[in-house]
Amino acid sequence: MMRVLTTDWNHILADEFMSSYWHELQGFVTSERSQYQVFPAPENVFNALELTPFAKTQIVILGQDPYHEPGQAHGLAFSVQDGTRIPPSLRNIFPNLVISDIAQRVIADLSNISIHTANPHLDGNSSPITSSVQ
């Protein structure tokens, strides 16, 4: 089995990482990265799953609004790195978040992989992996 994650999520998602659609999706993303600027950086794609082990996960939120600008997407939903201008969609959702509650739970935004378009999921098939995380 190819090791993708260093946490217990790797075992949970092992069948997905071995599937044909996963390999096709990886080929698609690799091709897109060779032609376009793709967010987040490869090392940040599974940031949320690396930061919070499955055994400690209480909630998973799959976002629908990918960030398109450099420095915004870094593998966590409702988040940008320090010093990054907050995108309008994130600024709009802040009043609706209960920060102290969310801070104790993982927020994984697997559809926050922006491939030169606001609708990256229309070209690459990431739905099976996101279904497995749910």
Image: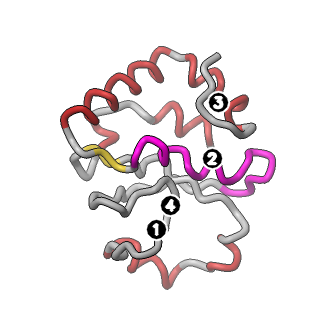
Give SS at disc 1.
loop
Q: CA distance from mark 4 to mark 2?
A: 12 Å
The residue lying at 34 percent from left, 49 percent from top is 39
Q: Amino acid at mark 4?
A: Ala
Query: For this rendering, which residue is in front, 85 or 24?
Result: 85
Instruction: Give the crowd class for mark 2: few <14, some 14-19, many >=20 residues within 10 Å.
Output: many
- In the picture, the disc for residue 77 is 4
Which is more N-terminal, label 2 or label 4? 2
Q: CA distance from mark 2 to mark 1?
A: 17 Å
Q: CA distance from mark 1 to mark 3?
A: 27 Å
The residue lying at 63 percent from left, 25 percent from top is 3
Where are the magenta residues, as a range? Answer: 41-59
Q: Position of residue 25 (x, y in %)?
A: 39, 26
Q: CA distance from mark 3 to mark 2?
A: 11 Å
User: Which residue, given by chain and number where applicable, does mark 3 sit on?
Assistant: 13
Q: CA distance from mark 4 to mark 1?
A: 11 Å
Q: Amino acid at mark 1?
A: Gln
Which is more N-terminal, label 3 or label 4? 3
User: Which residue, given by chain and number where applicable, does mark 1 sit on?
Assistant: 81
